[in-house]
Image (tube, helix red, strand yellow):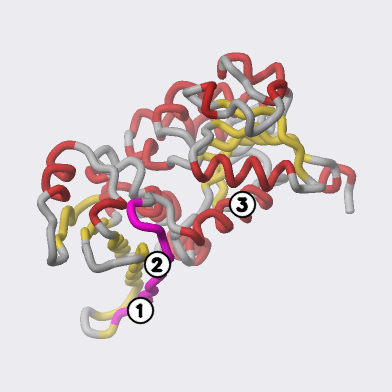
Amino acid sequence: MSENRSKVRRVGVVGFGHLGQYLVKAILNSKDLELGFVWNRTYESVLGHVDNNLILKDLEKFTERKVDLIVEVAHPCITDKFGEMFLEHADYMIGSPTTLANEAIQQKIYAKALSNSHGHGLYVPSGAFWGAEDVKKMADRGTLKELKVTMKKTPSAFKLCGELKEKNEKVTKDPVVLYSGPVRDLCPLAPNNVNTMAVAAIAAHNLGFSGVHGCLVADPSLDCHLVEIEIFGPGEETNKFHVKTVRTNPAKTGVVTGNATYSSFLSSLLVSRNKGVGIHLS
């Protein structure tokens, strides 16, 4: 094994919610990873959980910690403000890819990741999007014709904005379709819930955020998060290439992130390395 691959990798974690706490604990218990810093919007939330010298109070000073990888699990706005700077100094794993539905943000982050003179890349964790690499391969060949992602959760598991929030609050007994349409328009209304759809739009780059169809369903009977993915490829109208997967992810009531997503995210973190410049699924 080369020295580059075997060395301990220093990781900075931006965000200390449930997922951030899980990742920090895993990093501290790992022989191959070293915690470079933890930043959280509320500094007090981190106190007592890690050594004080590992807590970064001012994210603007992240360069002082000299990390190899920065992992964002905080908020979509982080990438807009810091994404380009992160890529100047480290690989960057974006945990809130819904921010890339904004074309201006996507363009500047992609441009930086593709032309980075420092050799750092942008890593997009597949999370709950099963088959991301296969979708990307089809997109690369131009054989991906349609992609639809349907997410079903109990109403309390959604953190929504605007009209979707109002619609979700009225759901009582029967399942309700909160949204059905382009993923680009959905991301700003459900930035914390539809990262799976954003990953789909990134993997399906020939369709993009405007071409991938997203459907959000509130179902009070569920005690899990369901993600249904439908892929259509070449063929006649009545005889098309078609793949459908259904992912059932157990989740506690009212929790945004399902149980299996934690380990999936950690797996993505572990492979987010050594790919150089560019946009990489992990």
Q: Which mark is residue 28?
A: none
Q: Amino acid at mark 2?
A: Thr
Q: Amino acid at mark 1?
A: Phe
According to the picture, the residue beneath numbered tag 1 turns out to be 241
Q: Which residues are magenta?
A: 240-254
Estimate the x, y position of residue 252 in percent, counting from the top left. 40, 58
According to the picture, the residue beneath numbered tag 3 turns out to be 266
Q: What's the CA distance linking mark 3 and mark 2?
A: 31 Å
Q: Amino acid at mark 3?
A: Leu
Q: Quadrant of the N terminus?
A: bottom right
Q: Secondary structure at mark 3?
A: helix
Assess disc 1: are there few (<14), some (14-19) or many (≥20) residues with their C-alpha within 10 Å of its C-alpha: some
Q: Secondary structure at mark 1?
A: strand
Residue 68 is one of the magenta-drawn residues: no
Residue depicted at x 24% and y 68% = 221
**Residue, far bottom:** 239
Q: Quick check: 264 left or right of 68?
A: left
